[in-house]
Amino acid sequence: MYIAFNPTRLITDGAGKLQAVLQQCDSSDPPQGKEHTALSGAREFTAYRIERHTVCRTVPMRLTPAQLTKWREFGASCAFGEYFTFDAEGTEAAPDDPQTVQLKFKSFKEKRYPGRLYEFSFTTIQVIA
């Protein structure tokens, strides 16, 4: 997995780039809209937009304090709908299918294990139509 983001919170110096291995990457395309049933029984649908939600979780990683700060900066810089580049299968050197996405509000989670092992989970949202 490769992430490129614009560091807006300026917690660390340098470019906003992260790489990790994902242990979970599940996508769904729930439509945004509403459904109405008329008195006649006919059903009508109003579609506002279609989004692809991708739930991601990294494998536990041993991180240095600088690397941990970079992950926290990603969570802080993209927490309020800022766009970033996400490539679930590629790397910076060999991109696979990079997409411009947003982080779902309050979805970025950090889990700590003994021995400075960290696991991150988050949900990305890509607007399809």
Image: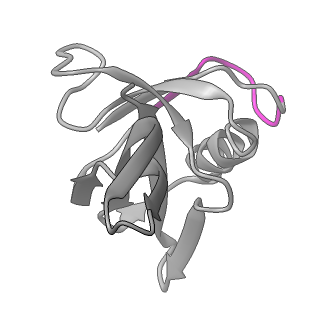
Q: Which x, y percent locates residue 99?
A: 35, 23
Q: Nearer the viewer, residue 42 or 10?
A: 42
User: Residue 60 is drawn in which quadrant?
Assistant: bottom left
Vertical position of residue 67 compared to residue 49: above or below: below
Q: Identify which residue is drawn at 20% across, 21% down.
A: 97
Side (left or right) of 89 relative to 66: left
Q: Which residue shows up at 29% across the image and 64% down it?
A: 59
Q: Residue furthest bottom?
A: 114
Answer above or below: position of 55 versus 60.
Answer: above
In the picture, the quarter occupied by the C terminus is top left
User: In this view of the protein, which residue sits in the foreground, 10 or 97?
Assistant: 97
Left/right placement of residue 84 relative to residue 96 reads right
Which of the 4 image quadrants contains residue 57?
A: bottom left
| In magenta segment, residue 110 | no
Q: In the image, what residue occupies the spot 61% across and 17% down? A: 15
Horizontal side of 17 relative to 54 (left or right) equals right
Percent position of residue 102, x then y: 55, 35
> Is most of the magenta stretch helix, strand or loop?
loop
Picture coordinates of residue 5, whole percent (x, y) = 58, 24
Residue situated furthest front in the rendering: 40
Q: Position of residue 127 (x, y in %)?
A: 44, 30
Specify start and end residues of the magenta stretch as a single range.
10-18
